[in-house]
Image (tube, helix red, strand yellow):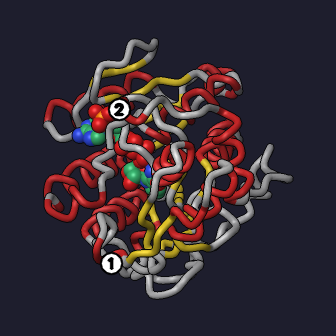
Amino acid sequence: MSSNHERSSNPVLLVGYGLIGNSLRNRLLAGGLPVACVTRRKVPLPGCHLVDLATEAGLSALRDLLRGLRPRSVVLAHGPSDVTWIEGHERQAAHVHCEAARIVAASGVPAILVSTDNVFAGERGRYTVADEPKPFNAYGRVKERAERLILAGGNGLVLRISLIYAWTNSGQRRTFAERCLAAAFEDRPLLAPTDQVFTPVYVADVSSVIAAICASERVPAGIRHLSGPDQLSRYEFARLAYQLAGSYDPLVRRCRRRDTEWASRPEFSSLACDDFTDVSDLAHWRPMTPREGLLAMIDERRPEPAEHHHV
Ligand SMILES: NC(=O)c1ccc[n+]([C@@H]2O[C@H](COP(=O)([O-])OP(=O)(O)OC[C@H]3O[C@@H](n4cnc5c(N)ncnc54)[C@H](OP(=O)(O)O)[C@@H]3O)[C@@H](O)[C@H]2O)c1
């Protein structure tokens, strides 16, 4: 057992440095917590370890890092995360997510597994932690297996998170909100499904909650849900983005999700958000509404010209 002093100098081990990892690393460092990162591509940052979890060497490197760094906690926020890719590559995705979860659970290090609302069938909105998972797609099945491994370790938190929105960095898959705002700024038309309903959550809320849990005395074990407060369709979200960006919202046209890249998503990707008031620093926290989050994005920056976008 580490002493309090030792624990405060032990890093949080952040596995995955994408949309969540990026924002979370900054938040942890701003809060004075040391961070080590596992990344698949080379990142010129201190404390980053190049590891491909799809390989035996990578899994063994993860084991060594857990032993060698003696992290105060570990956050599993790695891919594969592309729902459409996983639909055709379930075995490969399951290998990465389940083997990493198995290793972390066996290490005894307190763990936070970032999971998803896709573990539910998506037949209705606002699933709670009392609801039974019944995955709708390959992504949901993979994440639900990883959840069970973390929970079986007895020292882990499964944090199911709804679709996150934020600006991304170069090379990352762009978020739906980013695509909406980029199109709105250029007064371009956009197709958005009316039959996919979600409870989107702003990335700053995600990193605030995970960082506060990492900073607290003890990672709570079990399952929690983290989502935005409002349930709306992708179409309604896109209309809101156009309005807030000062564009003409009828440019957002209705479509059905079966005709889009979201065909493998359930009708509802929707969670009821837990309150987290038992975590120090989160006593007064509440997730941002889509209006607040989109305005924060608009304040943060405007996108580059269209020819530099990669979709
Ligand atoms: N984004 C959301 O809306 C959301 C919501 C709920 C849950 N989640 C879950 O949260 C996790 C992270 O999501 P994210 O949006 O931050 O994903 P992301 O932006 O795609 O980042 C994923 C990270 O994992 C890395 N990675 C992928 N395959 C790997 C491998 N074989 N070995 C080591 N690292 C690997 C990626 O490396 P590269 O940069 O080399 O690709 C990247 O650093 C995923 O498990 C996802 O299911 C995400």
Q: Residue at x 30, y 68 (%)?
A: 260
Q: Residue furthest bottom?
A: 123
152 relative to 209 in the view: left or right: left
- In contact (CB < 8 Å): disc 2 and disc 1: no
The answer to whether residue 186 shows anywhere in this view is yes
Residue 252 percent coordinates (x, y): 51, 64
Q: Quadrant of ligand 1?
A: top left
Residue 123 percent coordinates (x, y): 45, 87
Residue 250 percent coordinates (x, y): 56, 67
In-front residue for pair 271/288: 288
Quadrant in the picture for the N terminus: top right
Instruction: Give the residue at mark 2.
Output: 307
146 relative to 91 in the view: left or right: right
Q: Residue at x 65, y 48 (%)?
A: 245
Is 101 drawn above or below residue 11 in the view shown?
Answer: below
Quadrant in the picture for the C terminus: top left
- Name the element at disc 1: loop
